[in-house]
Image (cartoon, rainbow, N blue to C red):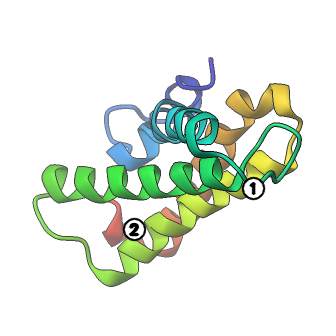
Amino acid sequence: IGIFLPLWISSDLANDPLLLLITGVVTIGIGDAFAAICGKTFGRVMLTERKTFEGSSASVLSQTCFLWILCDFYYGYTLPVLLSLLLGFLSVFSAGIELLIYEHSDNLLLPLAQFQVVLVLMQLNRSLFK
């Protein structure tokens, strides 16, 4: 459900930026998948009972790389430093939220939290998110 949540709550699917609409795919489909694989395979430093530093780091790195590549190909230009930092912030934010929330609801709350952060960033600088 969480992977589609941003699409369901979007106010204008035809005109909303792609970055806003794919927050569910990025947080659950990319970040959560890489966190699970790397956390199970390489995880040594436990952050919580079931979360590892290595898994959380893999989530942040995979989300940031995916968004950077997506923007490079979709928008057709290499990202400015500011936007790269904002995308990195989004990834770190979602990893931090995942550590703080109840374990069984993270697949619903992560996409929603990241959706809200992207909305705020869009309001701050609309030209970055066309």
Query: Could you say whether the residue bearing mark 2 is in a helix, strand or loop?
Result: helix
> In this view, which residue lies farthest toward the bottom?
81
Front-most of residues 119 and 78: 78
Spatial separation of the CA atoms under disc 2 and disc 1: 39 Å
Task: Report whether residue 5 is seen.
Answer: yes
**Residue 67: where, in percent of width, then height?**
35, 53
Q: Helix, strand, or loop for circle 1?
A: loop
**Which residue is identified by label 1?**
45
x and y percentages locating residue 105 in the rendered image: 81, 28
Closest to the observer: 43 or 27?
A: 43
Give the labeled residue for mark 2.
Answer: 126
Determine whether 70 is above or below 92 in the image: above
Residue type at mark 1 is Val
What type is the residue that disc 2 sits on?
A: Arg
Q: Quadrant of the N terminus?
A: top right
Q: For mark 1, does the 10 Å Cα neighbourhood hold few (<14), some (14 to 19), or many (20 or more) residues?
A: few
Quadrant position of the C terminus in the picture: bottom left
Q: Where is residue 34 in the image (x, y as percent from the top left)?
A: 50, 39
Q: Residue at x 76, y 52 (%)?
A: 97
Residue in the image at 58% along x and 45% along y: 42
Residue drawn at the location 62% of the way across and 34% of the way down: 40
Residue 66, above or below 82? above
Q: How crowded is mark 2: few (under 14 residues within 10 Å), some or many (20 or more)?
A: few
Q: Which residue is nearer to you in this view: 122 or 94?
A: 94
Name the front one of labels 2 and 1. 1
Q: Earlier in the sequence, mark 2 or mark 1?
A: 1
